[in-house]
Amino acid sequence: MAPSRSPFPGLTTDERARAAYSEGAGIHRIVPAGVALPRGVEELQALVRWAADTSTPLVPRGSGSGMPGGAVGRGVVVDLSSGFHWLAPDWSHRAVWVGASVTAAQIGDAARPFGLRLAPDPSSAAFATSGGLTATNAAGPRSVRCGSVRAWVDAVEIVEADGTARRVTRGEGKGERFVLSPDQRKLVQARFPHTRKNSSGYALDRYVESGDELDLLIGAEGTLALVTAVRWRLEPIPPDVAGAALGFASLEALGHAVPFLIALNPSAVELLDRTFLELVGGDGLDLPAGLEGLLLVEFERDTRAAARGVVGDAVRGLKASTAHVATAVDRGGLERLWSVRKLASPALARLPPSRRSLQVVEDGCVPLERLAEYIAGVRTAAGRCGVPVALFGHAGDGHVHVNALPDTTIPGWREALAGLFTAVTELLVTLGGTPSGEHGDGRLRAGLLERFYGPEVMSLFRDVKRAYDPGLILNPGVILPSPEWAPLVDLKVGADVAPIPDDIAARLREIERTAGWATPKLELARSSSP
Ligand SMILES: Cc1cc2nc3c(=O)[nH]c(=O)nc-3n(C[C@H](O)[C@H](O)[C@H](O)COP(=O)(O)OP(=O)(O)OC[C@H]3O[C@@H](n4cnc5c(N)ncnc54)[C@H](O)[C@@H]3O)c2cc1C
């Protein structure tokens, strides 16, 4: 499907440029047919109209840090990470309009002097774009209190599949394009998972509640429209913070502690599982032996006394079940206490080159009361399949990230990984979970959704897609599986990996290792030195 003619100078089919966009974070390598870097809405509209005329699939992309392969594909990759870089603050109303290219960190930097911040705090803030964050319904540790980005996006500007540009504002854009009957609304309410977070499928449950078209567009992963601007609602930065690290000798005790902590209104309840502590070298961490997991808890309050007081309540309330307690009474102390989380990247970098961190079951989320069962089940499945794993995540939301760490020089590693993918999927279905708490489905999970939602809801998902993109040009194969969907194909590792120039492969690997996703990808195409 090579483009027949350039609709504007920003489209290239150069081999090195295509190679530079063949990978994102996550497991995939797919060389696209072309790459386009539109500078502004009009150029994007021209590109989309050309794509509609020529039936060329478009793959919207921000910084490419998304995990499940939504930002890579065989069509034309549309890089929106640089051409939409503007910021229009409305601090007095605690809001800001930004172009799709603006990252979460750039919003934070602009808002901080005014005592404001973006409430969700993704770890990828330094590079994740406003378009990508909105398209995946991203989240962060603080989402335990503030929810996913859905709750903080007031409005978006989009370019639709026919090239039309328009604004969709919460409370104004009633979804007339896609209407659900009373029976279909009941079906949605019955079939959607009852998890605290969900970035899988189209958010029909939220759409049923709000009737707001915005709820269909947030989390749509570039399959319904291209987002060109986002109006973010901001929150005041709370004056004080305190927290604790709480260690547990059994998963059962950890599982019971989480709802207790949630009742105290924390701003974060993060999990570092035994497998994670082992990976980062638990011995050097000054923790007692035999911990099954550590919870890092943060409380933000209006006064220092209130923040310290609630930490005391947490520690006292869990005295009988904790095997380790350390507290912090200010921001600096908390950062020191939490620094253990930052040890994951150096530990992963220390792994031998043959051992790869592959994100295939990295985003499962279960009802809070099933958290301990889920952690135990993932560990068991990993042991059975012979794939080492390191688990961490957002315990307060029942949401666990899994780093699968197979040795890719051992014959059968791919089958073992596929076994883990299947086993964890079964586990999530059994526990009433969702395969994605914040990363989205991408290409990786598209073929699993029927297991979670059933055929009737899948049919509604297809109706949504038809209502917005009847020509199937916007990110086909994402959320709704392509006919040839298979688990774990188009991997960036293995004997049958798609060939690209060695120097570009090395630079992409380096970006992955250092989380250098903000790097303009065309730089990789220009330079030929590794
Ligand atoms: C080290 C690391 C840490 C991470 N931490 C977190 C975390 O804490 N929380 C979290 O939620 N995620 C996290 N992620 C995942 C990732 O950063 C998020 O999914 C982020 O929202 C992706 O933004 P992006 O700009 O990189 O989008 P991309 O990866 O480029 O795209 C992601 C999806 O959005 C679509 N898309 C992108 N831009 C647009 C647009 N303008 N219009 C329409 N569709 C678009 C793409 O088609 C794709 O389907 C992490 C990733 C890494 C590598």
Image (spheres, rainbow, N blue to C red):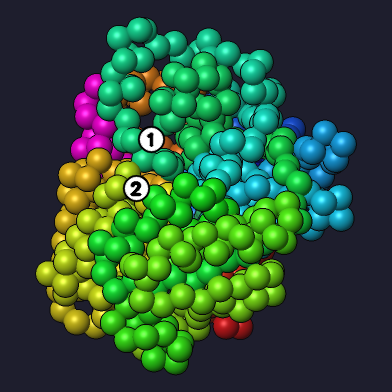
- Find residue 316 and report its horizontal and vertical position in percent: 46, 64
Q: Which residues are magenta?
A: 446-456
- Main SS category, magenta section: helix
Which image quadrant is residue 392 in? bottom left
Direction from residue 229 to residue 315 in the image, left or right: left
Q: Is residue 396 visible?
A: no
> Residue 304: x percent and y percent?
72, 61
- Name the residue at 53% across, 27% down: 215
**Residue nearer the viewer, 302 or 87:** 302
In which quadrant will I find the C terminus? Answer: bottom right
Most foreground residue, 380 or 76: 380
Q: Is mark 1 within 8 Å of ligand 1?
A: no
Q: Nearer the viewer, mark 2 or mark 1?
A: 2
Real-space Cα distance between discs 2 and 1?
20 Å
Tag 2 residue: 368
> Which residue appears farthest toward the bottom when viewing the image?
284
Q: Nearer the viewer, residue 211 or 66?
A: 211
The x, y position of residue 259, in whole percent, is 39, 50
Mark seen at residue 201:
1
Count of residue discs = 2
For marks 2 and 1, the one nearer the N-term is: 1
Task: Answer yes or no: is residue 386 visible.
Answer: yes
Q: Is residue 308 above or below residue 221?
A: below
**Which residue is at a point 25% across and 40% down the rendered structure image?**
432
Residue 113 within the magenta-colored segment of the rendering: no
Residue 164 occupies quadrant: top right
Residue at 54% x, 53% y: name it.
266
